[in-house]
Image: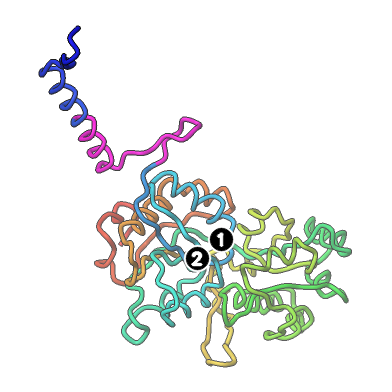
């Protein structure tokens, strides 16, 4: 071999390598553009991220949203999920105060949605649909010194209201100024007075509607009960089931869970002492909407689509009864992609 001899590369081979490399790069770009996913160490496919959506929801749904629906939605769609649960009224106040601009708003009361609708309310919401209903129950701590009495009430051998009225029982409920459940608790006790013919029952158990010693943020109530800070509290059936809290069921005539008794529920009202607003009793229904200030409407549409399709089994698994999602408000404002899932 001569010292000045250079390695020989066949021109056609070199061209083929370049073309092949370019083809691989092009395929990678096309795959990314089509939303291709990555494969995890377990071999499962994870959808490519499509941006994050912000979901504000009723605090009674914390475990359901954060442990089930949120993660499942991310895995199924590739959108990021960021959720926060509080009393529905408190969340609406944050939206009105421009403190939060969620992509999704889930309320435990349609009246809260209405408070965000119309020019006088800032036009934050144009429409909403119900997706599930629940009822009020009395959850209790199984390690409470009153546990035997609560168990007796749960099996029907002792009146539940007698147990709650016992001296020393620590009761928790939510603030009626911040959460519809707080309002419903007061209405429930008014209904119970009539149902059981016990005219002073509400005062005996609640100690007044604004008794601050019983009022806690909705998102904290379960933790306070399970940690032993409370003996009992007023909860929705689905949050008691989700948190594995033992509970006492109440008659349909007073539990605000059966729409068939709406005329009975409506006979009792709560008047806000500060604003004078009057709220009538009614069945407990969860609603969902996309606020007009949403920054990721494509993601919001994907979330509602998921909730009203694949997410249905998660709702029923947590004790939520499904309802027909009939649009309230401006039906023309509902995204066309959702029309197959809702009724106008």
Measured Cα–Cα span from mark 1 to mark 2: 7 Å
The quadrant the N terminus occupies is top left
Find residue 180 and report its horizontal and vertical position in percent.
56, 75
Q: Is residue 54 left or right of residue 235?
A: left
Residue 45 colored in magenta in the image: yes
- Looking at the image, which residue is at 28% across and 67% down? 331
Residue 30: quarter of image: top left
- Residue 109 in view, yes or no: yes
Q: What secondary structure is found at the residue carrying circle 1?
A: helix
Mark 2 is surrounded, within 10 Å at the Cα level, by few (under 14), some (14 to 19) or many (20 or more) other residues, namely many
Q: Is residue 201 left or right of residue 3?
A: right
CB of mark 1 within 8 Å of CB of mark 2?
yes
Q: Relative to 90, is 319 above or below?
A: above
What residue does disc 2 label?
A: 57
Find residue 315 and report its horizontal and vertical position in percent.
52, 52
- Residue 250 in view, yes or no: no
What residue does disc 1 label?
A: 61
Residue 101: quarter of image: bottom left
Along the line of sight, the residue nearer the viewer: 344 or 298: 298
Q: Is residue 18 left or right of residue 331?
A: left
Q: Relative to 215, is 137 above or below?
A: above
């Amino acid at each position: 071999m001569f010292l000045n001899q250079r390695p020989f590369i066949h021109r056609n081979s070199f061209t083929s390598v370049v073309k092949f490399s370019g083809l691989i790069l092009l395929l990678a770009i096309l795959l990314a553009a089509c939303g291709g996913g990555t494969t995890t160490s377990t071999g499962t496919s994870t959808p490519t991220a499509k941006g994050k959506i912000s979901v504000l929801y009723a605090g009674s749904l914390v475990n359901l949203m954060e442990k089930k629906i949120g993660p499942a939605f991310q895995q199924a769609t590739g959108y990021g999920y960021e959720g926060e649960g509080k009393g529905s009224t408190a969340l609406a106040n944050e939206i009105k105060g421009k403190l939060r601009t969620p992509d999704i708003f889930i309320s435990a009361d349609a009246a809260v949605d209405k408070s965000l609708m119309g020019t006088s309310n800032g036009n934050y919401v144009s429409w909403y649909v119900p997706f599930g209903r629940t009822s009020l129950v009395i959850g209790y701590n199984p390690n409470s010194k009153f546990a035997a009495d609560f168990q007796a009430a749960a099996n029907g051998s002792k009146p539940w209201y007698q147990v709650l009225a016992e001296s020393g029982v620590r009761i928790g409920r939510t603030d009626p100024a911040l959460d519809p459940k707080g309002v419903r608790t007061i209405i429930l006790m008014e209904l119970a007075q009539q149902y059981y013919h016990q005219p002073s029952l509400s005062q005996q158990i609640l100690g007044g509607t604004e008794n601050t010693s019983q009022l806690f943020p909705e998102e904290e109530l379960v933790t306070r009960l399970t940690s032993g800070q409370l003996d009992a509290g007023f909860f929705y059936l689905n949050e008691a089931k989700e948190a594995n809290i033992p509970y006492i069921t109440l008659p349909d005539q007073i539990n605000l869970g059966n729409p068939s008794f709406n005329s009975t529920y409506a006979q009792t009202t709560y008047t806000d002492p500060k604003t004078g607003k009057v709220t009538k009793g009614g069945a407990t229904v969860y609603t969902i909407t996309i606020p007009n200030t949403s920054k990721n409407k494509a993601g919001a549409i994907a979330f509602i689509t998921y909730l009203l399709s694949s997410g249905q089994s998660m709702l029923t698994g947590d004790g939520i009864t499904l309802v027909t999602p009939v649009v309230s408000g401006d039906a023309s404002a509902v995204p066309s992609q959702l029309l197959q899932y809702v009724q106008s």
